[in-house]
Amino acid sequence: MSVTNTGWVKIAGLGPGNETMVTAQVQDVVAEATDVVGYIPYVKRIPERPGLTLHATDNRVEIERATHALEMAAAGKRVVVVSSGDPGVFAMASAVFEALEAGDPAWLDLDIQVLPGITAMLAASARIGAPMGHDFAAINLSDNLKPWSLIEKRLRLAGEAGFAMGFYNPRSKSRPHQFGRALEILREACGGETLISFARDVSKPGETITTVTLNEATEEMADMRTVVIVGNADTRRVGRHVYTPRFAKEG
Ligand code: SAH
């Protein structure tokens, strides 16, 4: 099947939750869309209107969702695939490209675009101060798509290398104790006095931000609505703020 139509797929980030943090670019494509595809809570953020079909699906069906979006675009629809935060950060953009790689070669001619959003780690950093003011790493602590041994290795090496870190999906009901293990590794790799912040529901009603040292941190402080920020050895408090200086000594 050849693709000769005006359909498109825009993979859009909705930001951390507050509607003022959705970019104007994303608002514009949602206004032009015929179809919106995504995980149920994210699709709920899109207002209904005549001519727009909302396709909300459960989590963990990313490839089916992405394939559906590409099929609809190939049939002439204007499809927005929504993610929270940024779509390129542990979200739908890679899933769409995986589906594209595995799918109908004609889809390669489709108009496909990724529209960035404010990722949870950076929204949280802004609320905390500037903990990501120097080099940093973003790590997904879920072992759904990679072995736990790899997560341990990356935590240890990033900590030893002096990166500040942002952790997504830190602790779920199905794996309640892995985060405790992650804290142990971080204490060894970074030292127990390093600052760690727990940012829950950032930019949403009920937002909480708590900063403690790694020695004081416990696994119950994190859940799936929390993004966890760990500083480097130079990360410090200034009044109510936490920041990482822009300079570093030889490691
Ligand atoms: N694409 C998203 C991340 C999806 S993974 C982004 O760029 O932000 C889902 C994880 O993101 C959650 O488990 C949590 O760790 C983090 N997260 C998303 N929104 C958040 C918010 N408003 N406050 C705190 N953490 C959030």
Image (cartoon, rainbow, N blue to C red):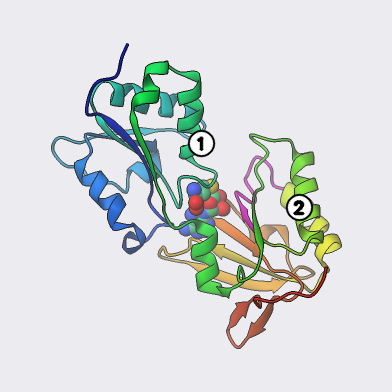
Q: Examine the image and state in which quarter residue 145 appears.
A: top right
Instruction: Name the residue located 26 percent from the left edge and 45 percent from the top edge.
Output: 29
Relative placement, left or right, of 69 versus 221 is left
Residue occupied by mark 2: 155
Q: Is residue 165 left or right of residue 48?
A: right
Q: Amino acid at mark 1?
A: Ser
Q: Name the residue at the right extreme.
A: 188
Q: Residue furthest left?
A: 50
Residue 205 x %, y %: 40, 65
Give the Cα distance between marks 2 and 1: 22 Å
Q: Main secondary structure of the magenta part?
A: loop
Q: Is residue 174 above or below residue 219?
A: above
Can residue 168 be seen? yes
Closer to the chain start, of discs 2 and 1, is 1
Amino acid at pointer 2? Leu
Magenta region, residue range:
165-176
